[in-house]
Image (tube, grey):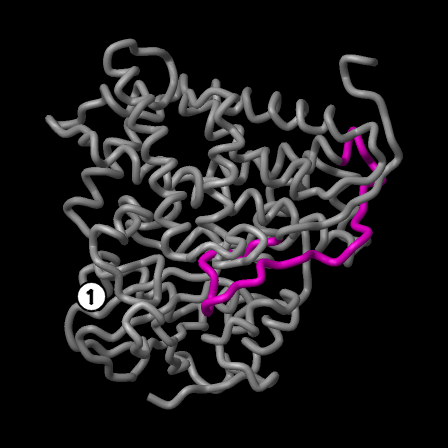
């Protein structure tokens, strides 16, 4: 398989490609996107000492088509890793996003049924309270690392409160999720063995959830964990061994979009002050489109993988059973065939058929509504309470050590603002 390289001379599979600023990566994708809809690449597999070949899918139409046809392009051979992983390992870290129907449909139905209208209403209320609480803790300082102060704790606290995880365990959950999202970054892995560290982080989250679930079976409460262990749909409920992987999915995939989009959104607004003014002057009228534009422009989830289940033709090109397709959402979200002036950040962009929450089909993000709500609340409260908040540094991206990261994570972003008093002091 011939490997295409970008204008920078880096292949998509190179870790160095992903350590650069967002716009540099997108500029390279713009060049590659005009060469082909499918960019052949190879990724070294340190676990087995072999190369894993794949096709990078970087145009909107092809990402959409593949996403819509799960029978031809499956997730069950691995959706969150370019390399093939044992099924048990893939499901351990990916829960039902690494499954195909009927198992995927069963788990998704049970989980979706646990989100009753009353529970969703309570969740929306808690989102605002948690965001306000975090801004209270930072508002007197005048300058903070936005990731540490708000972006990282905000969505994870929402998840922990939703699941009934006590605040005393929050740091444990945060540290474990940082490892799983860390893509081998030494800041989170240190000098520890990457594989053992990753497995250990997953085991920590699974152990925490299993202990809580066992308690909720005997002592039901009003949290989501209780709902998940007791909800039954058509005689189906989550098995005990399925709860731990689902919590890993929530703690990682359930917070990464909000976490990264909050940070990148602040950075992007700093680069586009005219767009910030439009949004800040009319939050009620602009928030919905602005949030979707951040998700399009930043595309926090870098990729998902699909694998051909049989010989298939896509856009006139023949592929074989077993071929891997890596769907790069950020590249597809700047496809000029779909988006007018795609490199321009426009808080009023409409229509905006981005696929930042995944392409259409059975694996579209179950938490997209919550993520949109979290982002809208975060920026609304920041604009109201810290109206001059602005970046004073460039985003510091994950120092990924093995190819494309699953999430385009940002480790640090310094922001400054005029100090103000917490709500309680007002």
Residue 352: image location, x then y, percent: 54, 55
Front residue of 128/212: it is 212
Q: Quadrant of the C terminus?
A: top right
Residue projecting furthest to the left: 235
Quadrant in which residue 315 is drawn: bottom left
Residue 351 visible, this orientation: no
Q: Is residue 395 magenta?
A: yes
Which residue is rendered at x = 69% and y = 56% of the image?
395
Quadrant in which residue 304 is drawn: bottom left
Label 1 SS? loop
Q: Which residues are magenta?
A: 383-410
Residue 323: image location, x then y, percent: 25, 75
Q: Quadrant of the N terminus?
A: bottom left
Residue 76 visible, this orientation: yes
- Name the residue beneath numbered marker 1: 72
Residue 418: image location, x then y, percent: 88, 35
């Amino acid at each position: 398989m011939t490997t295409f390289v970008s204008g920078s001379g880096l292949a998509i599979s190179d870790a160095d490609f992903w350590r650069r600023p967002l716009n540099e990566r997108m500029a390279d994708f713009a060049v590659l996107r005009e060469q082909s809809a499918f960019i052949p690449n190879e990724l070294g597999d340190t676990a087995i000492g072999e190369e894993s070949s794949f096709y990078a899918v970087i145009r909107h139409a092809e990402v959409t088509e593949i996403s819509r046809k799960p029978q031809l392009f499956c997730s069950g051979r691995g959706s969150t890793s370019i390399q093939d992983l044992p099924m048990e390992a893939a499901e351990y870290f990916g829960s039902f996003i690494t499954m195909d129907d009927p198992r995927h449909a069963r788990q998704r139905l049970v989980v979706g049924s646990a989100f009753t209208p009353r529970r969703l209403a309570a969740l929306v209320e808690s989102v605002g309270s948690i965001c306000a609480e975090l801004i209270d803790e930072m508002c007197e300082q005048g300058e903070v690392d936005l990731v540490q102060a708000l972006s990282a704790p905000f969505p994870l606290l929402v998840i922990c409160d939703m699941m009934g995880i006590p605040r005393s365990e929050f740091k444990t959950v945060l540290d474990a999720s940082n490892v799983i999202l860390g893509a081998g970054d030494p800041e989170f892995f240190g000098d520890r063995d990457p594989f053992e560290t990753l497995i250990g982080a997953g085991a920590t989250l699974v152990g925490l959830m299993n202990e809580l679930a066992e308690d909720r079976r005997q002592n039901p409460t009003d949290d989501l964990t209780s709902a998940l262990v007791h909800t039954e749909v058509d005689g189906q409920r989550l098995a005990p061994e399925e709860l731990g992987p689902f919590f890993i999915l929530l703690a990682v995939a359930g917070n990464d979009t909000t976490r990264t989009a909050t940070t990148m959104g602040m950075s992007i607004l700093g680069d586009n002050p005219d767009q910030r003014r439009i949004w800040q002057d009319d939050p009620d009228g602009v928030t919905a489109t602005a949030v979707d534009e951040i998700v399009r422009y930043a595309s926090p989830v870098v990729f998902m993988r699909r694998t051909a289940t049989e010989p298939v033709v896509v856009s006139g090109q023949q592929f074989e059973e077993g071929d891997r397709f890596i769907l790069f959402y950020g590249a597809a979200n700047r496809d000029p065939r779909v988006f007018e002036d795609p490199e321009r950040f426009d808080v009023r962009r409409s229509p905006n058929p981005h696929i930042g929450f995944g392409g259409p089909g059975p694996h579209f993000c179950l938490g997209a509504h919550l993520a949109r709500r979290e982002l809208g609340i975060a920026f609304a409260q920041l604009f109201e309470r810290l109206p001059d908040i602005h970046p004073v540094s460039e985003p510091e991206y994950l120092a990924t050590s093995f190819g494309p990261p699953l999430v385009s994570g940002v480790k640090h972003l310094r922001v400054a603002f005029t100090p103000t008093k917490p709500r309680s002091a007002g």
